[in-house]
Structure formats: structure tokens, C-alpha cells
Image: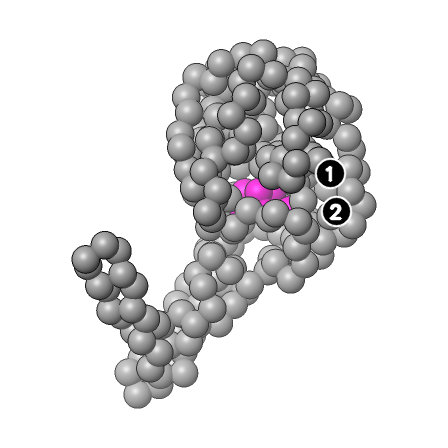
């Protein structure tokens, strides 16, 4: 049994590793691009928003597709980790195999891919989109997501009340920093052109609000790995409640 020991100041936590590969690895992301966001963080950030499967979700910097894929898995009620194995599966003398099979069968019974969604992932890099499509297929949600090569300056949507949830470039390298003011200015302009949308943006760029031209309604400090980031939340109007007849 692998033993893990973690120290935080003067407290040591000792535990048995039951998962093996870190839990943030869901098992579907075989191909990645530079600076990907972890699957668990992407899922948590989506759950910090009011988005649900009936609402539009667009990630204009989708990279290897983590935000759209996690959103599609949430929409389809797909349990995280269905595409991976866990170390404790081999401990048959402690956890009978039947329990694993029963848990997997229960999770599979809950999956519903027969739903209408409007989840989109854009990126300017064709290689990133290739990775995103392969990862979405591996996760089993490729039919729920539309990926497209598109620059953020071309971002548009004709429907109201959608969500931008994205992880744009941070400019961690010196040569990239000079491009950030114009990039975030473009993000702000395209967001403003969307009708009653909300935007949720995680970035370490501290002048994001300045160049987007709008102060965030909420802001949370979150560590993405070792990088201190901010989760800027720009809240749009809520859609009118559906009548019983519309439902």
C-alpha cells in the first residue's frame, strides 16, 4: 500500500493512497496544450457559476477543451473518473470487485447523452482544437460540444443569456506580456457586444478589468498550481422564468 505523507507547518498528515494517479486526472485528457487548466479546477469553476445545461456556454480560449468537456460531463450527469482506474481496485481482499462493478454500473445508468446543449469551444490554434476534439471523444461527450477555429476578435452569438467561461493567456513569459492589454481589450469589446451574457474569467493578469473596460461584479483569488490567479465574475441578466406551458 503506497503511503503518502504531507506536511503543513507543524502538522503531518499520513494516509494510504487509494487512487494512484492524481484525482485531477479524469482519464480523458490524452493530449494537452501549453498551460492547461486541471480538470478538477475547471469543473469547480463551472460549478461556481449559475450555468446549467439549458444555457449557452462558450470558451473562446478552449485549448485542449477542458472547460467545454467538463461542462458537457456535468450536463450529461457523467461521473468524473469513469474513464480511469483507481489503485484500490486491485485490493480485492479489502474491497470486493463487485462493489466497483456496481458503482460503475450505477454511474453508467445515470449518463444521459440524449440532451440538447449549446456548448462551444473556440481557439485560434488548429493543433489545440485537434487535442480538444480527441479529448472530448475520449470523454464520450464529443457529440455535445461544437469546436471551431476562431479568433477571439470574431467572437459573437445571436442568442441572449449565455456564459463565457474561459482561461485566457496570462502572459507569464516576458515576450507575451506586451500583447495582453490589446488581448483583454478585445475580450472586453466582444463580451460587451453579447446580449445579456455573463463572463467568468480566470487569469493572473491583474489589469484585466482595466483593459476589459468594466469592473467585475465579484472576484475570487484562486491558486492555479503555484500561480496566484483571479476569478473575475461579470454577471449578466437572468433569463425570464419559463411558464408552465413553455416547460
Q: Position of residue 167 (x, y in %)?
A: 58, 36
Q: Which residue is mark 1?
A: 123
Residue at the extreme left of the image, as rendered: 10
The answer to whether residue 134 is above or below residue 167 is below
67 part of magenta stretch: yes
Pointer 1: residues within 10 angstroms few (<14), some, or many (20+)? many
C-alpha separation, residue under disc 1 versus residue under disc 2: 7 Å
Q: Earlier in the sequence, mark 1 or mark 2?
A: 1
In the image, residue 33 above or below residue 188:
below
| Element carrying mark 1 | strand
In front of the other: 197 or 246: 197
- Quarter containing the N terminus: bottom left
Q: Secondary structure at mark 2?
A: helix
Q: Position of residue 240 (x, y in %)?
A: 48, 15
For residue 88, side relative to residue 162 (left or right): left
Which residue is label 2 attached to?
129
Residue placed at 54% from the left, 12% from the top? 214
The reply to whether dot 1 and dot 2 touch (C-beta < 8 Å) is yes
Q: Quadrant of residue 126?
A: top right
Q: Which residues are magenta?
A: 65-71
Task: Identify the residue at image location x=69%, y=27%.
Answer: 178
Q: Which residue is painted at 55% across and 29% down in the image?
A: 205
Any part of residue 174 in sight: yes
Q: Main secondary structure of the magenta part?
A: helix
Amino acid at each position: 500500500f503506497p503511503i503518502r505523507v504531507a506536511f503543513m507547518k507543524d502538522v503531518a498528515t499520513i494516509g494510504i493512497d487509494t487512487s494512484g494517479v492524481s484525482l485531477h486526472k479524469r482519464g480523458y485528457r490524452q493530449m494537452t496544450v501549453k498551460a492547461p487548466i486541471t480538470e478538477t479546477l475547471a469543473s469547480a469553476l463551472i460549478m461556481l457559476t449559475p450555468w446549467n445545461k439549458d444555457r449557452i456556454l462558450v470558451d473562446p480560449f478552449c485549448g485542449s477543451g477542458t472547460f467545454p468537456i467538463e461542462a458537457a460531463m456535468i450536463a450529461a450527469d457523467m461521473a468524473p473518473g469513469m474513464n480511469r482506474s483507481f489503485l484500490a481496485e486491485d485490493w480485492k481482499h479489502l474491497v470486493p470487485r463487485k462493489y466497483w462493478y456496481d458503482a460503475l454500473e450505477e454511474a453508467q445508468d445515470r449518463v444521459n447523452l440524449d440532451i440538447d446543449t449549446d456548448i462551444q469551444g473556440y481557439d485560434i490554434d488548429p493543433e489545440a482544437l485537434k487535442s480538444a476534439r480527441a479529448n472530448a471523444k475520449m470523454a464520450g461527450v464529443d457529440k455535445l460540444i461544437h469546436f471551431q477555429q476562431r479568433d477571439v476578435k470574431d467572437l459573437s452569438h445571436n442568442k441572449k443569456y449565455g456564459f463565457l467561461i474561459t482561461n485566457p493567456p496570462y502572459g507569464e513569459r516576458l515576450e507575451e506580456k506586451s500583447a495582453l492589454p490589446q488581448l483583454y481589450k478585445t475580450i472586453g469589446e466582444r463580451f460587451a457586444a453579447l446580449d445579456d451574457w455573463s463572463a467568468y474569467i480566470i487569469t493572473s493578469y491583474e489589469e484585466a478589468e482595466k483593459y476589459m473596460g468594466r469592473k467585475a461584479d465579484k472576484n475570487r483569488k484562486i491558486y492555479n498550481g503555484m500561480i496566484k490567479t483571479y476569478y473575475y465574475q461579470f454577471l449578466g441578466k437572468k433569463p425570464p422564468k419559463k411558464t408552465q406551458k413553455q416547460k
